[in-house]
Image: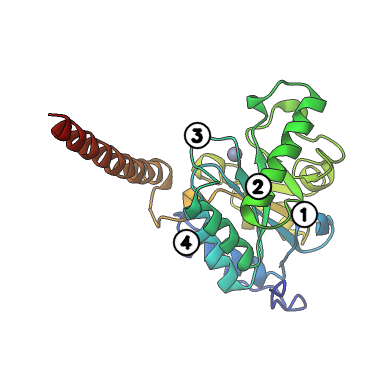
Amino acid sequence: MPMNALDTSAAPRTAIHRQADFSLSDYRALIADLQGLGYRDTPLEGLVPDRRLVFLRHDVDLCIARALRVAEEEANLGVSASYYVLVSTEMYNPASAQSRDQLRRLRDLGHRIGLHFDATFYHNERTALETAADEECAILERLSGGPVDSISFHRPAPELMGLAGEFAGRRHTYEPNVFTEVAYISDSSGGFFQGHPLDHPSVTAGRALQLLTHPIWWADDLATPSRLALDRMRGERTDALDRVLAAATAKAKTRSAKAG
Ligand SMILES: [Zn+2]
């Protein structure tokens, strides 16, 4: 996919949205407003501080299907993002047939896949952590059918924030030149609690951004996203578990009837 069809010479528009809610249409408005201000999407390695560039990062903490909904919207807007996917998690199974299809679809839409690395599962020693991250990257490459060339840390320990240089032979999202030397804006906990991205001084100054959003907050079109989004996801998981348990119980009943 071409990077996008932005005209970076266009004069910044003045019609700026400030979303009260988090929804797919609010996300579309946010990206469209950044485009209107002359911002162009870039992968991690293209981020330089003094240009109107935005690195669109998504940490997939809870649900790959919801990430795909955001990815479809981005593709419609002609922008490419990076989706950081967990391998060691109890929240989803990246190796399921459905997940593998979804990961490949993310790539087909023109997005990149990186590793979302949870260091708490491993011995807290740098070499051991890098070996583990490299192994998880290899797994994710096989599952997603393409390269995994950057890493974001899940709930990073202080020593990983601002870590200079590569990690496990790959770029990572907390390197000073993409984390402290450019504006870093996050929707952690379901809100822009440090201020709306469009109000950030770096946007006013036309400087680069790393914009971290979590698809779980945006994909369900809910007015008050954090609790309702999690409730909806919990309901889906419960339904799926009920179906599996009902099937298992039915088989057990059939077996005991035959035995009887
Ligand atoms: Zn995370």
- Relative to 108, say whether 205 is above or below: above
Residue at 45%, 58% (x, y): give it.
23
Secondary element under disc 1, as helix, strand or loop, is helix
Left or right, residue 77 beside residue 162:
left
Q: On the image, numbered disc 2 is attached to which residue?
A: 140
Q: Which disc is residue 24 wearing? A: 4
The answer to whether residue 249 is seen in the rendering is yes
Q: Position of residue 101 (x, y in %)?
A: 53, 59
Q: CB of mark 1 within 8 Å of CB of mark 4?
A: no
Q: Position of residue 204 (x, y in %)?
A: 72, 59
Q: Amino acid at mark 2?
A: Leu
Q: Position of residue 159 (x, y in %)?
A: 77, 26
- Relative to 71, say whether 11 is above or below: below
Q: Where does ligand 1 appear, by image quarter?
A: top right
Residue at 40%, 57% (x, y): give it.
221
Of labels 2 and 3, the one closer to you: 2
Q: Residue furthest right?
A: 165
Q: Residue furthest front?
A: 259
Q: On the image, numbered disc 3 is attached to which residue?
A: 90
Mark 3 CB in 8 Å range of ligand 1? no
The answer to whether residue 18 is seen in the rendering is no
Q: On the image, numbered disc 1 is attached to which residue?
A: 44
